[in-house]
Amino acid sequence: MEQNLSERKKRVLSLIQPTAVPTLGNYLGALKNWRDMAEDYDCIFGVADLHALTVRPEPADLRRQTLEMFALLLALGLDPDKSIVFIQSHVHTHAELSWILNCYTQFGEAARMTQFKEKSQKHSDNINIGLFSYPTLMAADILIYQTDFVPVGADQKQHLELTRDIAERFNGIYGNVFTPPEPFIGKKGAKIMSLQDPTAKMSKSDINPKASVSVLDEPDAIVKKFKSAVTDSDSRVCYAEGKDGVNNLMTVYSCCTGLDYDAIEREFDGKGYGDFKAAVAGAVIEELRPIRENYGRIIADKAYLAECASKGAASALRLSTRTLDKVKRKVGLWQKA
Ligand code: TRP
């Protein structure tokens, strides 16, 4: 049944690229919020496999990592009956709209994108047009669902601004077609740092395996990594300038337990870093346990995965076709009855 507009919940959308298994940092900084948002918003979450093609992954890796990332989204607790959870390439309307948006985006605008410049340097042997038009595909992902809010990290903010510019330009020419999206700023934008170098962000591509915790790490591995986490020569558990390592552990502990920094300081008053690290590891293990267990079950159940992917794609296609049809009409593409 069609809901009337004033009753419609605000719509949130985000996609994640199918790369390596997300870290605790990705989880506490973004994915955990996705799950919480599903309560209050009309949510659409997807695996951006078309975006991943811009760096030419091994086909077998891309296929496996897409399935793994999709399973992980379900394992996080995103309910495929309440939210739309889908794989980008299963919904052809995205690529179609991105072509149209390419024609409403200036070369200079796309050339200014920081990520394009960085990736062109990093992949200087493969500066393809897909890498250049990556932001217009992202704009299509967002605009095709009339998305109100997009939870994005700092690195994607420029792309979101471009998306707004494209939407406003298009609306200026053709009337109200797109909802210009806003960035979604979470309650606390937890930024989790490397356990070995707490001045650098925790990253899945860190060469030191002790620097990051994956959301699927086993309890033993989690204990070991926190045990060897870099702290300082002081011994007090408190949040203070110059105590980057301890501050980071406090943030992790706070995110997993809901305790604020004062409460954490009181809890560990008179105790040393050893006790504190053990407690942080324990809290992380409990936080991640349901995800790891769900994931193990879901990744083994290929029939369930296929069923969820079909359901997500069908809903996404139905919804996105409305916008795409309107866009085609507006720009003058002749549509047969
Ligand atoms: N570019 C995003 C990233 O790398 C992934 C992405 C693709 C995305 N489409 C999106 C994020 C739409 C938000 C909305 O993180």
Image (cartoon, rainbow, N blue to C red):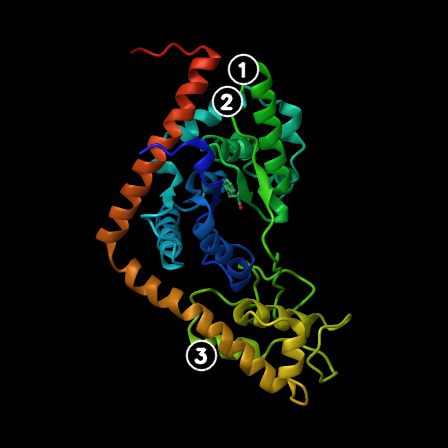
Q: Is residue 86 above or below residue 175?
A: below
Amino acid type, callout 3: Asp
Q: Assess whether mark 1 and mark 2 are in contact (beta carbons under 8 angstroms).
A: yes
Q: Tell me which amino acid carries mark 1.
A: Tyr
Please report contact status of discs 3 and 2: CB closer than 8 Å, yes or no.
Answer: no
For the point 43% across and 17% down, which residue is it?
Answer: 328
Residue count near mark 1 (Cα–Cα under 10 Å), binned few <14, some 14–19, many ≥20: few
Please state the horizontal and vertical placement of residue 209, each as a whole percent of the image: 53, 68
**Mark 1 or 3: the one toward you:** 1
Q: How many marks?
A: 3
Going by the numbered disc 2, the residue's amino acid type is: Val
Callout 1: helix, strand or loop? helix
Q: Position of residue 213 (x, y in %)?
A: 51, 68
CA distance separating discs 3 and 2: 52 Å
Label 3 CA crowd tier, 10 Å (few <14, some 14–19, many 20+) = few
189 or 299, which lies in front? 189
Above or below: residue 321 compared with residue 14:
above
* Residue under the image location 28 percent in, 51 percent down: 305
Q: Residues within 10 Å of mark 2 (few under 14, many from 20)?
A: many
Vertical relation: 282 (above or below) 165:
below
Residue corresponding to mark 3? 220
Toward the left, the furthest residue is: 303
Which residue is labeled 1 in the image?
174
Name the residue tied to disc 2. 177
- Cβ of mark 3 under 8 Å from ligand 1: the answer is no
Query: Can residue 128 be seen?
Result: no
Residue 30 appearing in the image? yes
